[in-house]
Image (cartoon, helix red, strand yellow):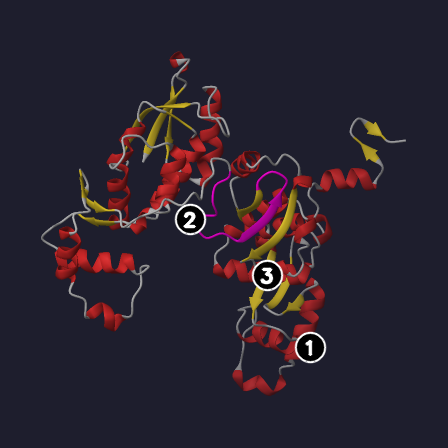
Amino acid sequence: MNVTLCNRGHPEYGAATIPLPIPDEEYARCMELLEALEIGSVTGHDCYVDQITDAPPSLDMLEGTMINVDELDFLARSLDRYTDEELAKFQCMTATREHWDMQTLINLSFSCEQATVITDFSKLEEAGRSHYMTMHGGGVPVEEYNQLNGVGIARSLIADGGGRITPYGVVFENAMRIEPLYDGHSFPPYADKPYLMEFTVETDREGELTFFLPQPEKRLERLLERAGIRSADQIHLRTWYSELPDAVVDRLDVPHESLDELNSLCAAAGRLDQKEMQKFSAVVNYAQPRYAFQMRLLAENLELFDFIPDIRTAEEFGRYLIQESGHYEYDENLEPYYDYDKCGREQMESESGGYTPEGYVSYHGTMSLDELMIEDPVEQYRKEQGLQMGGLSC
């Protein structure tokens, strides 16, 4: 869906149309659009909703109101996971009150699965079975489910008289309780896509919080500010979990790493497909970096490495070179005369290759491997040579 936002106090500034949920690659640009309108506060409700399009009809209630853009984005991300039935529950529940603030709407999005909705009375069997599943936590044994009398369950539910008619169907709240997961400050843990790292931290103000990486740099900055975190000293790592390759995790000293660098590492690794991730793991084992930024640089420069999976000895490497690489004309009649081990050793020595648990790796960049793993090779060179911008150092 899309939302058009403007500065209520200065309509002459124009408006910005923001896609929701905001795609990661567009987040920084969207924040720039809002900043140009002098809106988009991290915690304030300073964005006037001029129009919402392609959204669930129940969200039309937000038109003409003041919202916080990150709260609306989080709500959109929460709704984005919904099935048609779950969306119907959300819409019906929003119709049970005249006014909903954004905090309660976000909490509703994590609670409305407790309700039952009937949108088509010609499908009472389906409605009854759905209600039974709802009342049993969403799961029952297959044999029990197959024996259900869905029509009878639905009729009994209707006869109890607890339903409320809404424009989106008849809703039964089932003593639903809206859980206060969002307190108006820090968003509740919610992984709406695959993430590579998850952190649980203790902060001076908010207590225990969960962060998922990678995040757009600007979003992570705003999430930390929303939690009142303006310095790394305010973050006390409690637990963490990672989907990064073991070779990366084993070398990371997470508690002493920069959160920004860990985020950048996850962003770089997140762009790799499965085969590239295997190569990345092998390159890390080969290069043996010490810091997150060095691993990020390796992930961003994988094309400078050759990788042959499942090659772990000189003999296997030599056999690959002669039989499979295409650099040699293999003749099976000469098999007894091939010295695969010697061929593998000589080739490895000529290109400074190495064997890793994932396979054979060699580096073919123009700078040294140590230079490749320097954040700014030019600046590092200046420091090593005693040079500084503007002339020689003393």
Q: Which residue lies furthest to the right in this view?
A: 394
* For the residues bearing labels 3 and 1, Cβ distance under 8 angstroms: no
**Disc 3 or disc 1, which is closer to the eye?**
3
User: Could you tell me what secondary structure mostly forms the magenta stretch?
Assistant: loop
Q: Disc 2 designates what residue?
A: 192
**Three-letter amino acid code at disc 1?**
Lys
Q: As rendered, which of 282 and 195 lies closer to the eye?
A: 195
- Of pointers 1 and 2, the one earlier in the residue sequence: 2
The quadrant in which the C terminus is found is top right
The local secondary structure at tag 1 comes to helix
* Image point (45%, 34%), residue name: 70
The image shows residue 19 at horizontal and vertical percentages of 37, 34
- Of pointers 3 and 2, the one earlier in the residue sequence: 2
The image shows residue 321 at horizontal and vertical percentages of 58, 72
The local secondary structure at tag 2 comes to loop
Q: As rendered, which of 33 and 158 lies closer to the eye?
A: 158
* Image point (56%, 50%), residue name: 266
**Three-letter amino acid code at disc 3?**
Ser
Magenta region, residue range: 186-206
The local secondary structure at tag 3 comes to helix
**Alpha carbon distance from label 1 to label 2:** 52 Å
Q: Disc 3 designates what residue?
A: 281
The quadrant in which the N terminus is found is top left
**Disc 1 or disc 2, which is closer to the eye?**
2
- Of pointers 3 and 1, the one earlier in the residue sequence: 3
Magenta span has 190? yes
Q: Is residue 298 visible?
A: no
Q: Disc 1 designates what residue?
A: 342
